[in-house]
Image (spheres, grey):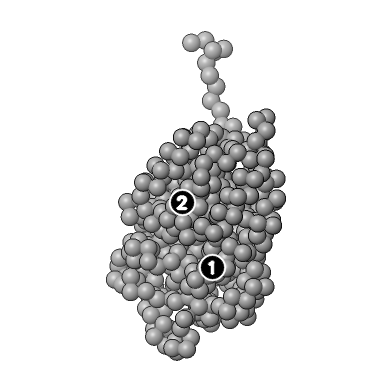
Amino acid sequence: MSDRARPSNADITFSVPFTHRLRITDDVCGDDYALLGELLDGGETGRARVLLVSERALKENSQRLQEKLSADTNIELVAETMWIDGGEASKNSLDQIKSLLQSINETNLDRRSYVIVIGGGAVLDAVGFAAAIAHRGIRLVRIPTTTLAQADSGVGVKNAINYFDKKNWVGTFAVPWAVFNDSRLLDSLPDRDFRSGFSEAVKVSLLKDPNEFEWLCEQAAAIRQRDLGTTQRAISRSCQLHLDHITNGGDPFEMLEARPLDFGHWSAHRLEPRTQYTLRHGEAVAIGVAIDCIYSSLAYGFPSEAARKVCDCLRAIGITLWHPAIDPIDELLKGLEEFRQHLGGRLTVTMLKQVGQPVNVHEIDEEKMREAIETLRLWQEDWQPDQAPS
């Protein structure tokens, strides 16, 4: 081969522009529908082709949205609403994904079509995964219906299902076309699900905003009582902090070792399958955050009174900080290796030196981690009955 014909070696850095569209609404299925409609561009065909997928428990609001879409002359609703069961069960097998892919195929959706999904975080994950792998990506509009999804995962760029009895083992990174955080859709949430979502708000404030953490502690009782102004403010700030990290943190697809937004998640992701997902993700995260705050106080100088304050804040919001699945501790600690595999390299876990001062560590002192878990057990036993969430 001549020199002229020989290909040259090259390492070429390039970037791909994305737009993350977030809209805050009070009734996207009703009076605020126009904000959604204007984002559904039909392009040269003139009409946007849309498949609506909804969590089964949300029929009333989903049917209202279906009526709006059907009446919009710029929209072609390609089928009746596709109903799926909510909760982690929607992520626990390929059956739901196959069904979604079949619907996408039968309705002839393409890369310029839209899948609109209404549901909690697990449903958004499963539907988002199907949309991301069909034709290598169909435009996805997320309408999260839980405090957890609105405050955190709904604005993220990850989609996944559980596999091999491991959390989010099969998945993709894909930027959603748009996200609508709608306050009305939270009204029907049970108290347990409503409150547990704020664990992610506490988590991100510990990493990024000490003032926000103090505010959450002061407003914990109001959040527990579902005061509308307080909870909307807490969700909005949590969403902003998560979104700022994703869009401005320089690592939206988690190519680097550090994953600070997964603070507290190594144990949370282990606890969920150990309870057959009866433990809510927000509850598991709260336990994980409590454990890692205590560990940080033992290993990295995080003030012990701050660790206790974190736990008191989560409890005051109404989140339980213990579950029998924590025992045996040896089984829980296996979550560290699963977390390392999920990272795809050496173990990197975020801990805290101070509120707002995270530190990435590559080794865990298992004896100190056991001590942290035993400390949480003792604190749990000390809490008075009137502090326990209803």
Residue that appears at 53% across and 50% down:
117
Amino acid marked by disc 1 = Ser
Tell me where residue 224 sits by quadrant. Answer: bottom right
Residue that label 1 marks: 188
For disc 1, the neighbor class at 10 Å (few under 14, some 14 to 19, many from 20) is few
Residue 273 seen: yes
3D distance between C-alphas at marks 1 and 2: 18 Å
Counting from the top left corner in percent of width and height, residue 339 is at 41, 56
Counting from the top left corner in percent of width and height, residue 230 is at 65, 74
- Against 212, residue 241 (above or below) is above
- Against 11, residue 184 (above or below) is below
Tell me where residue 16 sits by quadrant. Answer: top right
Counting from the top left corner in percent of width and height, residue 366 is at 36, 68
Front one among 262 and 87:
87
Residue that appears at 47% across and 89% down:
386
Residue that label 2 marks: 83
